[in-house]
Amino acid sequence: MTAVMVLIEAMTDLHLIAKLTSPLLPLLPYSVYFDTVRNRQPIVLKRTEWTAIWVRQHNNTGHDGAASPKSCSGYEHLAHTKVRLQRYRGNFMALRLRVPTHHPMFVQPQDRVGIDNSKGIQTMLARVWSASLIGIESVKVGVEVDVSGGLPGIIIVGLPDAAVQESKERVKAALRNAGFTFPMRRIVINLTPADLRKEGPSFDLPISMGILAASEQINPQLLGDFLFLGELSLDGTLRPITGVLPIAAAAKQMGFIGLVVPQTNANEAAVVKGLSVYGFEHVSQVSDFLNDPDSVKPTPAEGHPSDQRQTYLDLRDVKGQVHARRALEIAAAGGHNLIFVGPPGSGKTILARRLPGILPPLAFGESLEVTKIHSVAGLLKDQGHLLRQRPFRSPHHSASGPALVGGGSFPKPGEISLAHRGVLFLDELTEFKRDVLEFLRQPLEDGFVSISRARQSVTFPAQFTLVASTNPCPCGYYADPIQACTCSPRQRESYWAKLSGPLMDRIDLQVAVNRLKPEEITQQSQGEASAPIRERVQAARDIANQRFQSESDLHCNAQMSSQQLRHWCPLNDATRQLLETAITRLGLSARATDRILKVARTIADLANASSLEATHVAEAIQYRTIDRLQ
């Protein structure tokens, strides 16, 4: 028997193998079933259970064909059986002699093969793992593929959307054009869990791998260790998808060894440490990897957040506006919301656009969180790197509510979530619709936005610094010392009516930006640069982080609750009396009073003061003088 095995191993002409081995089989007490795709260990079966001989091909040459059934006529049990040569992708070629399907050898758990005894039909099952996104969180999805007898067709169940339903046509064409044999049988694809809606083309690759595994064209041993994502072109090319980074982070937590994705997404997924990421350009490369996993090396991470070049606008370009620059520094140090009010050309927009340049860099956890959101939204341009720069979003005043907070049948992040850990700039605030601005009230208070739809509800993070600018009236020149205002009191009242009291209460710093003086416009000297301001901001934030080290959910002063304010911002008699006077004269609400204390705490941090003084509170009160400007 050993001699027969060696002979079969050494030969490459499969027709000749069939002719030489068939007369010997009746003479042997046992026949051999060895070196299978699924398990490489030799299996010795009785002669009456002999079904196939698998031969390793030592080169890439060879041919497909069919041996004549007469070549095995000397073996009595194999009468009426098909003898077929089949070439597998990879380095395997098989001489398969199929026995009737009711034969007991088909019932082998390790081969995942079952029998429909009522019809005598062989069924094969394979399972591949993928993932789906709910908001920015990932859920593991099982792709179960059953190939059985019946009329040829593909059925996809498990709440697939239109893009997933269309994948059966893409997968069929891609596998055929890639050189695989598409099984002309009844194929049922189940996406688990069945009560979760599946959307997008990212299930093309796991479905194709499941079909190849169920039809015994690839090695299924590694399918349980990897998570598969990718869209297929009709020629088998893998196309990039969105949301790979959060899925990669979740795959590591789920215990997967690695992730198989399109080559374009490999660098993005490789950012997650401790996860082997394999990027491929074609579906045939994926099958070759599964048949010979040692032939491919995982994709290394190409960059680190600190490697990215910082590109910010510098505050040295801003002339004058000392009061507004101070407010900008306070906003950066404490994460406070800010609004600039002034005539056209006073510098409101250029001041707001320079806020990211004085913010401290993102920490690693913040960077990963921000990059996840941009990956889900499909806005990750620098793939392979975590976002180092704090985001700056500036939507047009014609933006709708869903565009601002997110939405859709399957909710996607909006502008406030894309500005998470960064800046949301609303230029010409009073030009936005009032109902759109009211969408901001809950996210500004809670730091997240919940979107509920009939199909699902998701929560997106939205901890951002709101910076807004507006003119004081429709013509823009109310209280301007040079140009007279042409608006009536009624027009000014209607103009400011778009900004509700609760919304203005949530804006900590309300700064009047005056027209530049002639000598300030013509001066040649530049203002203070962003770099030294950023150092002061970083020092103030370090003081706050040291103070909040026992509070894991606090990162800056603007996030303190009323209870935390009482603990961290105690008032002496002089400070309390000053604050009570301001509440009476300005008609401040309890929320506005808390905002004053938060700003005062930031001013004290910038001054490296351990306790609040009357001077800190007095400066903070200066930034609440336009609550009821009309």
Image: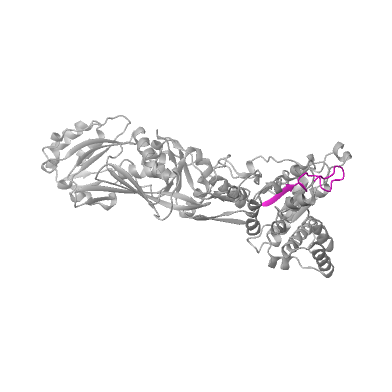
Q: Is residue 37 visible?
A: no
| Relative to 334, residue 148 above or below | above
For image coordinates 33% across by 43% down, the residue present is 211
227 magenta-colored: no
- The extreme bottom residue here reads 573
| Relative to 293, residue 585 above or below | below
- Left or right: 274 with respect to 175? right
Point out residue 20 in the picture as x, y percentages from the top left corner. Answer: 16, 34
| Relative to 71, residue 442 above or below | below
Point out residue 239 in the picture as x, y percentages from the top left corner. Answer: 46, 37
Point out residue 628 in the picture as x, y percentages from the top left corner. Answer: 77, 56
| Secondary structure mostly taken by the magenta-highlighted segment of the chain | loop
477 magenta-colored: yes
| Relative to 236, residue 560 above or below | below
- Left or right: 436 with respect to 201? right
Q: Quadrant of the N terminus?
A: top left
Point out residue 66 in the picture as x, y percentages from the top left corner. Answer: 21, 33
Question: From which residue to which does the magenta span run?
Answer: 464-486
